[in-house]
C-alpha cells in the first residue's frame, strides 16, 4: 500500500535539495522533513579522509576525492531506498559529476584520463534504470548578489576568504548544470519567494508546490 502524507505526497518519496553554496539547502532540508515527518540525509564531511589532502594539493587528490564522494553518495542513496524512502536529502549525487569533477577537468586539476574514468564509473553506477533516482529534485536558485549577501551574512571564515570570482563561477556552473539536467523531475524555487528563518509557515506553499509537481509527474507516467 502506498501511504501518503496529509499533503498527498507519497510517504515513501525521496526528495533531493540542490543548489550552490549559500542558498539554504540545509535549512530547506530540515523544514521539509519537519513538515512531512520525513527523515533527513546530510553529507558526512567530518569523516572524509581526502578533504585536507585535497585542499593542500588539488591536482594530486581531486580524483580520489570525487571517487570517495561518488561511493559515499551511492551507498547513501541505496540505504535510503532500502529503508523505504520518506527522506529529504541535502545535496544530490548528480552535482559531483555535473559541476565539480567537470570543473577540475576543465581547470586542469584532474587529468583527462582520470576524468574519463570517473565519468565512466558514474554512468555505470548512476545513469542506469537500476539506480533509484529521487522522485523530485528541488533546485534552490537566486541571483549572484542574493547568494553573496547570504554567504556574507552567515560569516563562515573559509567562505569569507574565498574570492568572489569563485562564487561567480560556481553560480554560472550550477545554472548551466540545472538547465541541462534531466535525470529526475525538477522543481525550481527562488530563494526570495520564502523566508524560513523569519516565517516558518512559508514552508506550506512550498509543500503544496511539491505535491502538485509530484502528482503531475505521476500522471505523465501513466
Image: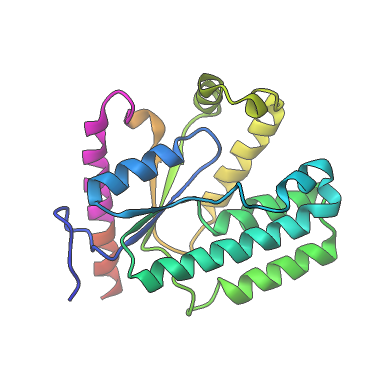
Front residue (pair 216, 23): 23
**Residue 132 appears at what percent x and percent y?**
44, 72
**Residue 82 falls in image quadrant:** bottom left
Q: Residue at image x 25%, y 61%?
A: 216
Q: Is residue 108 visible?
A: no
Q: Quadrant of the C terminus?
A: bottom left
Q: Is residue 146 above or below residue 51?
A: above
Q: Residue 12: give x, y in percent of width and height.
A: 28, 66
Q: What is the count of numbered marks?
A: 0
Q: Quadrant of the N terminus?
A: bottom left
Instruction: Note whether 183 is above or below 211 in the view shown.
Output: below
Quarter occupied by residue 134: bottom left
Q: Is residue 40 left or right of residue 58?
A: left
- The dominant secondary structure in magenta is helix
Residue 209 is one of the magenta-drawn residues? yes
Residue 107 at what x, y percent from top left?
A: 81, 46
**Residue pushed farthest front?**
47
As drawn, the residue found furthest toward the left would be 6
**In the image, is residue 32 part of the stretch drawn in magenta?**
no
The magenta stretch spans which residues? Answer: 194-213
Amino acid at each position: 500500500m502506498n501511504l501518503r502524507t496529509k499533503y498527498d505526497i507519497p510517504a515513501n518519496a525521496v526528495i533531493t535539495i540542490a543548489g550552490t553554496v549559500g542558498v539554504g539547502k540545509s535549512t530547506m532540508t530540515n523544514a521539509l522533513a519537519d513538515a512531512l515527518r520525513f527523515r533527513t540525509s546530510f553529507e558526512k564531511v567530518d569523516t572524509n579522509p581526502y578533504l585536507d589532502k585535497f585542499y593542500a594539493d588539488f591536482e594530486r587528490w581531486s580524483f580520489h576525492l570525487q571517487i570517495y564522494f561518488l561511493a559515499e553518495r551511492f551507498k547513501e542513496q541505496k540505504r535510503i531506498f532500502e529503508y523505504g524512502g520518506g527522506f529529504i536529502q541535502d545535496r544530490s549525487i548528480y552535482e559531483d559529476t555535473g559541476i565539480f569533477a567537470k570543473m577540475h577537468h576543465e581547470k586542469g586539476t584532474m587529468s583527462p584520463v582520470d576524468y574519463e574514468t570517473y565519468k565512466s564509473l558514474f554512468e555505470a553506477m548512476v545513469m542506469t534504470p537500476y539506480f533509484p533516482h529521487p522522485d523530485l529534485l528541488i533546485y534552490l536558485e537566486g541571483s549572484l548578489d542574493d547568494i553573496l549577501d547570504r554567504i556574507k551574512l552567515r560569516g563562515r571564515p573559509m567562505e569569507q576568504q574565498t574570492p568572489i570570482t569563485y562564487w561567480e563561477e560556481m553560480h554560472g556552473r550550477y545554472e548551466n548544470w540545472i538547465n541541462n539536467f534531466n535525470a529526475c523531475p525538477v522543481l525550481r524555487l527562488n530563494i526570495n519567494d520564502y523566508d524560513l528563518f523569519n516565517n516558518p509557515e512559508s514552508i506550506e506553499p512550498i509543500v503544496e508546490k511539491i505535491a502538485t509537481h509530484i502528482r503531475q509527474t505521476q500522471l505523465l507516467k501513466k
